[in-house]
Amino acid sequence: MISQTQTQSLTLLDESIADAWRPDELLTLSDWSDKFVTLSTKDSSEPGPYRTARTPYVRAIADALSPFSNFERIVWMAGAQVGKTRVGLNWLGYVIDVAPGPMLLVEPTVDTARKVSKQRVATMIESIPQLREKVSPARERDSGNTLFEKEFPGGMIMMTGANSAVGLRSMPIRNLFLDEVDGYPPDADGEGDPVSLAEKRTGTFSRRKIFLVSTPTIKGLSRIEVEFLATDQRRYFVPCPSCAFMDWLRWDRIQWPEKQPQAARCVCTACGVLIEERHKTQMLERGEWRATAECSSARIIGFHISALYAPLGWKSWGEIAIDFVKSHEDPQQLKTWVNTVLGETWEEKGDAVDADNLRARLEEYPAEVPHGVAILTAAVDVQGDRLELAVKGWGAAEESWLIALHQVQGDPARDATWFELDKMLLETYEHASGRKMPARVVTIDSGGQHTDEVYKFCKVRAARRVAGEMQHVYAIKGIGGAREIVSRPSTSNRYHVRLFSIGVDTAKDKIFGRMHLKAPGPGFMHLPIWSDEEYLEQLTAEKAVRRYKKGIGAVREYVKIRERNEGLDLEVYNLAALYIMGLKFIAGLARLAEEMSRPFDGKPPPSSGGSSPPASSRDGGSWMGGRGGKGWVHRW
């Protein structure tokens, strides 16, 4: 006969056996994230417990990454500030704790992978006890915890860059996180497409997961857009708080009163009511993902979301509208806005400009220098048998006017040619107000065969007074590639003159965008009626082409479509002259232009005072300063 004590012991044994065989709680990735993830001050603006409810739209995306979801390929195209990288990092922690197996995280470069590992992955492991228990401290010998590898029971997480073929083709993996794929190079160390190389490593696993995430870039070159278009293209539909009609947020639904973008609201396409920002939290809570296209595979799913969905406290509709107003006149800024805010690709327009388009907008100025012009700059292009000179006027928001074109015939190796140029640089131009205006900054190309002559000319004219105003003459050298328009000057040359490096491709991007503007205003380029056919052809003598470069990716380069391009070069050099003055000075051109528009009383405008823009550092100031030596006007 079994005693009561024995019965109790058997009951406890049965319960222990049952506990041992009971399956672990089946947590989805979103549930696990809510239960265990804590955000630190190192990688979040909102430290503390992670809450999926803060961004409800990520729940379906996260849960598609859970092992019991049937989806194999998950694509997420999105704007910035919507939490996409956070979902990927949570998935990484989830794999360590709940669904162990080999995993690979691919960032655009090895350097980026290193930063993500140090700043985000290591921080997450340290902040979550369940992960700390399974990933040994890096300081322990043979811990399996290195910068690019994290071992844990049942698996390993590796991190690499898309520019490293070695990191992309080693051991097999079940889970693949491809982060910011639009930043990947087209070729990894000459071994092919990095996405394809990484995907091949998942081939031996029947239940694999591939997560592709990115902010999109240029249409036709964007990897994430191609991937998204091959899915069912899900959008997050939210209800109107007034009529409950379900629709997805897009830019054409955002409206604001004239000149009040901060008051932006969202209009309902069904009832027409203007929805205020304060309703967004409730709308997101009640939203749902809906497919907007057919997909050939039931194992592929795609999501798109813009920054219009960012929760309260992150990015408001008003802030988005303000950013749009600031950027919509500048194609380069607008491109960034479209990519990062709307989460959409930018369709390149105007890779080339037709001279006929410019010919149609020639205008007759009411004065040699029209109202609206605040300052003048000049640029010199050095050719084998002549010097080309263009004078430009600049006003508010970089609106510009071509004021004069001159040509100095003669060998640039002869002093006489430069003396003729100097006479032209000492000329003044009459403003509509009656003032006489000289060019304030002159840039001269030093990148050809006559570098020494350019240096000598600039050295004794670095700062001189012309018609009561300071004039600065600087040597410049153009450099291709993605770089700022004007870099900090160098004096490491035999004449110790200030030499400015000019980002010619960046400048051309801006100029070509402005040649497409239709009406006067910010950035618009005014051309006088006397502009001849040759000048217009030179101004449009190049076009932008997109090419892939090894280790870099898709790049824009400018190539000649006509032989002579001096007009375009002079535009670049004049833009550089403006930027040498500094962003703070440029920001004050609207006020100066207003001062210039008043009737001339014989005195310089108060904001000019006959002096140079303030000399300071790169952060918005100028690089100008320093007086020339005695006898600098006509002397080497």
Image (cartoon, rainbow, N blue to C red):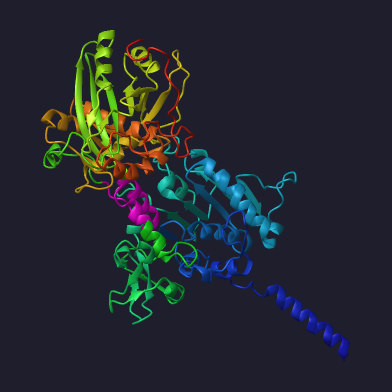
Q: Inspect the magenta stretch and tell me whether residue 356 lies in it.
A: no
The residue nearer to you, when weighing 387 against 268, is 387
Which residue of the protein is positioned furthest toward the front in this rendering?
601
Name which residue lies at 27% across and 12% down.
419
Left/right placement of residue 587 relative to residue 96 reads: left
User: How far across and down, in percent of the image, does residue 284 sit?
Assistant: 44, 72
**Relative to 269, is 459 above or below?**
above
Q: How many marks?
A: 0
Quarter of the image that includes the C terminus? top left
Q: Is residue 621 shown left or right of residue 531?
A: right
Residue 274 in view in this figure: yes
Residue drawn at 71 percent across, 76 percent down:
19
**Depicted 124 relative to depicted 459: above or below:** below
Name the residue nearer the viewer: 302 or 336. 336
Quadrant for the N terminus in the image: bottom right
Task: Return the x and y of residue 515 as percentages of the image width and height.
Answer: 22, 41
Q: Position of residue 201 (x, y in %)?
A: 49, 49
Task: Specify the principal SS of the magenta part.
Answer: helix
Return the x and y of residue 530 as percentages of the image width and height: 12, 32
Q: Which residues are magenta?
A: 323-348
Residue 275 sits in quarter:
bottom left
